[in-house]
Amino acid sequence: MTDLDIAKKSTLQPIVAIAKKLGIDPEEIETFGKYKAKLPLHLIDETKAKQSHLILVSAISPTPAGEGKTTMSIGLSEGLNQLHKKTTVVLREPSLGPVFGIKGGATGGGFSQVLPMEDINLHFTGDFSAIEKAHNLLSALIDNNLQNKTNNLGIDARTVAWKRVMDMNDRSLRNIVVGLGGTTSGIPRETGFDITAASEIMAILCLSKDINDLKTRLGNIFVGYTFDKTPIYARDLKAQGAMTALLKDAIKPNLVQTIEGNPAIIHGGPFANIAQGTNSVIATKMGMTFSDYTVTEAGFGFDLGGEKFLDIKCQSAELKPEAVVLTTTIRALKYHGGADLKNLTTPDVVALKLGLPNLEKHLENVLKFNITPIIAINKFTSDSDEEIELIRQFARDANIQFAVADIWALGGKGALELAQCVINVVEEGKSDFQPLYQWNSPVTEKIAKIAKEIYGANHVEYASLAKAHLKRIDDLGLNGLPICMAKTQKSLSDNPDILGRPKDFTITVREIEIAVGAGFLIPITGTMMRMPGLPPHPASEGIDVTDDGEIIGLF
């Protein structure tokens, strides 16, 4: 069966029953139909949250073969619940760009899914739409201020970097000109569209502690400069109040369920190659308030989502993960070892050995944060016993816990070994999270720390534009912000074609974006784009609705 077939054959419990499992009065939740609900922020209890064991699921460098972090996160939460540990999985919301593009949905797979699968992948509770509208409201206010002679802030249109956003892959909108059509149609200027997941509003929502913090962060968004070089922020346009009004419901996390009827909280969806790549602080703390164990994931490989989760989110929200589950597949490791994509289901111990250095580097990176890693093999039917034993021996030699997780086929039952490994690590209590760098370090020092220690680079080079941006950051007094590197997810380097564990390479920073509202700086490396394009045959070609309204073709 496909993921969608399995999801449709599953029996869902009313969302009020899932709330009761968490210990939440059904009168407290705000239902969206029978199977979805919003959770009000006052339910978060910081004292209780500190008593929950936070587990991060990450992965090796992604490959076209797929690794399955979301599936692993859901399966692990099912396994922990089967071992009588009250557990909630906390995930990001899917973006419609990947759903209709090449990657597909983000609700897990097989018997490790969150439900209702179709709703979550398509619109859900409208959070992305609200983020898109809040972002584009600021865009409209900027252009309106440029147009009008009264209430004009004197913004130099050439310095405005704030674009518009939409939740779709559309390469034609990356670079556009607005304001054409005469004097009544605005001031002509170059701009463009980013995908909604790359919006600073998304990052702000996911890092905000409450409504007041959200409003303050929105007001702090850097817009550009006036002609006399005075910096302009969203608060100067009096935008933050209306933007907050658009986000007043979107800031509340969403409660759904897993296939096995356990609670799942899904909220926010920043990409990890161009943003922080983790769900909201509010969602994580909500899960921790009501659970003994809280399982969450961070996008792409540990070098991206994992590092940002720890250095940005955990430092900002004072979170201390106790274990990192490093997801990998034998197929992906063989790909990193040079095996051809079409041959990954053929046993190949030689290619697997050659791919192990990528796993080894990510394990070393986890240990830099003083957190205990666990290797989790996302099992496929093509995995041979010899290949599994090779990785088991690798883990044994490195003195690292190891588990094979057959989560797609068996759900929680297939994750019992992994769940027990997690419990063992937590009960041993050896993890004591330490960040990679301190926020108050110089900007170039923080960038070098990430590039050299996490990626394995030996040098960081700055293009002339990036050097100009470093001066601007210093002039604005923003040196104390953390770093959110924009880098390809396909390689530890900034070159997507270099697989495995590259060494002795240079990271080139082209420019540095300022995200004052989110509270971080974004060095752009390589050829990163904030608006993806569609493939020649996008997934949308296979999605349809039957005459009786049933969605087909989602994956």
Image: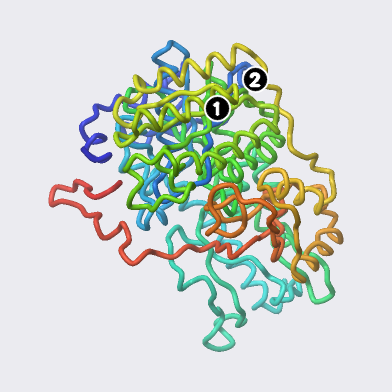
Estimate the x, y position of residue 339 in percent, counting from the top left. 41, 50
At 72% from the left and 57% from the top, the residue drawn is: 235
- When asked about the image quadrant of residue 9, the answer is top left
| Viewer-nearest of discs 1 and 2 | 2
Report which residue position mark 1 lands on.
Answer: 286
Residue at the disc numbered 2: 50
Q: Nearer the viewer, residue 92 or 352?
A: 352
Q: Nearer the viewer, residue 423 or 482?
A: 423
Above or below: residue 423 compared with residue 318: above
Residue 207 location in percent, x, y? Answer: 63, 41
- Decide if residue 511 is on the left or right side of residue 125: right
Q: Earlier in the sequence, mark 1 or mark 2?
A: 2
Residue type at the position of mark 2: Lys
**Frontmost residue, 421 versus 348:** 348
Label 2 environment density (alpha carbons within 10 Å; few <14, some 14–19, many ≥20): some
Mark 1 residue type: Met
Residue located at (72% from left, 60% from top) = 222
Nearer-the-camera pick, 551 or 315? 315
